[in-house]
Image (cartoon, rainbow, N blue to C red):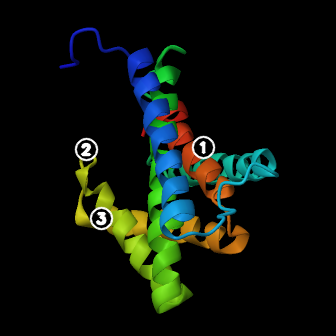
């Protein structure tokens, strides 16, 4: 049961604060501990990169659900009002920003320096899948699938751009489309 006084709007505020705190912590880590000027979250070109990632995330989820629907595995059983979008935005913000900074900005990047690109991609994808074992109805098969499809895809887009914005946009749109549009 929700805590008294806790609403989707409160959760949205908490998610925004968590995302901002993660960005600040990453800046402190890269600038003060690693002592380097990171371009991972530089603002120049961020909107374009985030938008491209978001378009890819939306399109990939629509394509995925379309294939499932074509084979009879997806059926619309109801709908929610627009108010559900506040909770969806909250989830998309916190998962897209915090998970991408942690897994691509820190884990992948440091593993890549230590072990190389392929090992970093495999290990960060496996960790990404394992992190989803706490999701409702999670299984080892689901975690493996998440590692293969999303962990590798998000790591690859980071490898391609060497910045976090496209991966953040893709992750946010994937989750928002999956939960907010299709309810899966």
**SS category of the residue bearing label 1:** helix
Q: Residue furthest bottom?
A: 115
139 lies left or right of 171: left
The structure residue drawn at horizontal position 52% and vertical position 85%, both measured from the top left corner, is 113
Q: Which residue is mark 3?
A: 130
Query: Vertically, is 13 above or below 43?
Result: above
Q: Give residue 39's quadrant in the image.
A: bottom right
Q: Give residue 158's quadrant in the image.
A: bottom right
Q: Give residue 78's quadrant in the image.
A: top left
In space, the residues marked 2 and 3 are separated at their CA atoms by 13 Å
Mark sitting earlier along the chain (2/1): 2
Mark sitting earlier along the chain (1/3): 3
Q: Position of residue 99 (x, y in %)?
A: 45, 54
Say the numbered circle drawn on residue 146: none
Query: Vertically, is 31 above or below 8?
Result: below
Query: Vertically, is 160 above or below 154?
Result: below
Q: Position of residue 107 (x, y in %)?
A: 44, 70
The structure residue drawn at horizontal position 68% and vertical position 47%, both measured from the top left corner, is 54
Say the numbered circle drawn on residue 136: 2
132, 15: nearer the viewer: 15
Q: Which residue is mark 1?
A: 173
Q: Residue furthest top?
A: 5
The structure residue drawn at horizontal position 40% and vertical position 27%, both measured from the top left corner, is 14
Marks 2 & 1, CB-CB < 8 Å contact: no
Mark sitting earlier along the chain (2/3): 3
106, 140: nearer the viewer: 106
């Amino acid at each position: 049961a929700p805590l008294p006084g806790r609403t989707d709007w409160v959760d949205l505020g908490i998610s925004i604060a968590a995302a901002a705190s993660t960005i600040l912590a990453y800046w402190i880590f890269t600038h003060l501990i690693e002592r380097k000027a990171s371009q991972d979250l530089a603002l120049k070109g961020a909107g374009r990169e985030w938008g491209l990632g978001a378009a890819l995330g939306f399109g990939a989820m629509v394509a995925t659900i379309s294939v499932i629907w074509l084979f009879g595995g997806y059926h619309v059983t109801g709908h929610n009002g627009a108010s559900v979008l506040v909770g969806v935005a909250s989830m998309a913000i916190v998962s897209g920003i915090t998970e991408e900074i942690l897994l691509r900005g820190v884990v992948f990047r440091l593993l890549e320096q230590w072990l190389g690109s392929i090992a970093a991609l495999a290990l960060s994808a496996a960790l990404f899948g394992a992190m989803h074992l706490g999701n409702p109805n999670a299984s080892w098969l689901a975690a493996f699938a998440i590692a293969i499809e999303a962990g590798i895809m998000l790591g690859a887009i980071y490898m391609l751009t060497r910045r976090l914005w496209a991966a953040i946009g893709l992750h946010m749109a994937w989750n928002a489309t999956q939960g907010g549009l299709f309810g899966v």
